Amino acid sequence: MLALGAMQAVPLSTSGSQTSLRFAMESYLQSLADLRVAVSAFSSTQRDGILWTTFLLGLFELMQDASGQKWLQHMVFGTSQALIASGPTTCASGTMRTFFIQARTFEVCRSIIFNQASFLASPEWIVLTDSLSNASVATATASLSHLLKLVVLCSALRARTAEFIDCLPVSCPNMDSGGFLEALNLATEGFHLREALENWKTSAIFPPERREEMLLSTVYYSATSMYLSGNYDYDLGHWQMMGVGVPALDLHEIAGHYDTIVTTVRESLATTSLSPLLFLFPLRVAGARARQAWQQHVVMDLLQQVRKQFAVADAMILELTGVWSSSRASM
């Protein structure tokens, strides 16, 4: 907590910025050392403290490490593994429930930004997610919780689809019946997720006091809709050769979701206490679809705002710059 507080103070300070930064790094290194000691002499009474320490260290690394690799290691080998070891039953109540709710959003972001399946997509964790939604029915939290479940399922589908596309034979029409059946299954699952997203949009209810959840849910709905379309339309030629219909959005729908993302993110950054980190995934998706220079400038400006608090935005900026350069070169 000391390290996070000091890092938060750095952009607010002028004369004392170096002192704050040095104190932040010293506190971070001390926390790492204390965490290693606690893990090596683990006891069940320390579990909650170790989990929160790992999680908060990851947040610090997102503020300080532009590559995002240290945070990724903490999420994959620290926080996520600790949750898996604890199991969904333990996370259903008490302090572990609170921790799970906080950590889940960042695990969702990790899985979808890096196109990796998450343990949250496994049946036992889906049951836990559903139970949390049912416990807070008719609230914005329930709506957001259900949407996050769909994000996780889309991410898991993306990982399987990418593996399938990579293994396609050079001549798709010559694939065996097993391959064609797998293609149909992947497309069908996508249609089911598209339907689930539209059902979510129709049924989501947000009372006025839940404005922040409404804004976050709105931007995640549009980002996930575009992400699901990209699972197919970036490889549309393969699906067309196989003669398999896919749930891809048309250009007008994509443009609408792009507008929703940039407008809602801008409003959220300016008027809410939502962490800018939560908008990296939507901005990455919107940036990938930004074909016009002005659209790219809008996304870049928003990412620069995120970067003021989280250096990891540099990795996203660098990646999108490469995407845009390649797009211009192919025109």
Image: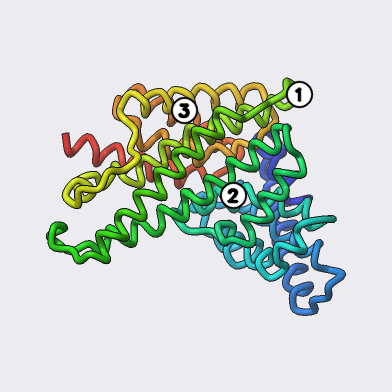
Q: Which residue is mark 2?
A: 62
Q: Quarter-wise, where is residue 173 in the image?
A: bottom left
- What is the C-alpha distance between the residues marked 2 and 3? 19 Å
Q: Earlier in the sequence, mark 2 or mark 3?
A: 2
| Residue depicted at x 36% and y 46% | 231
Give the quadrant of the C terminus. Answer: top left
Counting from the top left corner in percent of width and height, residue 265 is at 54, 27
- Compared to residue 147, the image places residue 158 above or below, namely below
| Residue depicted at x 76% and y 23% | 209
* Amino acid at dot 3: Asp
Q: Residues within 10 Å of mark 1 (few under 14, many from 20)?
A: few
| Residue depicted at x 60% and y 32% | 216
Q: Which mark is residue 209?
A: 1
Seen from the viewer's position, the closer of residues 36 and 289 is 289
Q: Which residue is mark 3?
A: 301
Q: Secondary structure at mark 2?
A: helix
